[in-house]
Amino acid sequence: MPRERPRPTKPRWPESYGLSKDAGPHVDWGDAVLRLSAARNYWVGSTGSDRRPYVAPVWGIWLDGVFCFSTAVTSRKGRNLRSNPAIAIHLESGDDVLILQGDVEAVTDASTFARYAQAYKAKYGWRPEFGKPGQVTYAVRPRAAFTWRERDFPTTATRWVFPTA
């Protein structure tokens, strides 16, 4: 079931970033969803029990208001996310920025996984397998997102707050 749209707010950044007190959102969430859906590569950031940050590119699917991706359980990101479910996801562009923050949860429902696998096959030409040993598929339920365009920063800077489930 699709989630409610996030609420746009002004980012809570230092005054030196140049945000005016009356600045409002200038990037439409619908445009952000299109970019999340169309992107080929996503950068995911995680931190494990050793508190060291780790960033890696992944392929993924924006599905019903959550970001889904698969990884090996024994990969660095797999181990990190097992001990600390907090994650940041960034699209490739530093000029048209979209960052998600949230927590991962394993996809264990076969029907949700089937929809993910079908969309993944259509996008990447390869279909992940449900329950494959050593693999985990995560759904990221965003808590917040940040969007802005470099060409007209900081007027387009927007913090999106997601409803809690």
Image: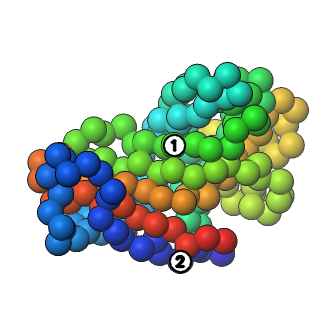
Q: Earlier in the sequence, mark 2 or mark 1?
A: 2
Q: Categorize mark 1 by other alpha carbons within 10 Å: few (<14), some (14-19), many (20+).
A: many
Q: In the shown orientation, is residue 121 left or right of residue 93?
A: right
Query: Which image quarter: residue 157?
Result: bottom left
Q: Nearer the viewer, mark 2 or mark 1?
A: 1
Q: Residue type at mark 1?
A: Ala
What x and y, as percent, mark residue 36? 44, 54
Residue in view at x 67 percent, y 22 percent? 50
91 vs 135: above or below: below
Q: How is the image coloured?
A: rainbow
Give the labeled residue for mark 2.
Answer: 4
What x and y, as percent, mark residue 133? 87, 32
Front residue (pair 147, 128):
147
99 vs 136: above or below: below
Asked whether residue 118 appears in the rendered view, the answer is no
What x and y, as percent, mark residue 23? 18, 68
What is the residue that sits farthest to the front in this orientation? 15
Q: In the shown orientation, is residue 32 left or right of residue 20?
A: right
- Give the spatial CA distance, label 2 vs label 1: 20 Å
Give the labeled residue for mark 1.
Answer: 88
Q: In the shown orientation, is residue 78 left or right of residue 3?
A: right
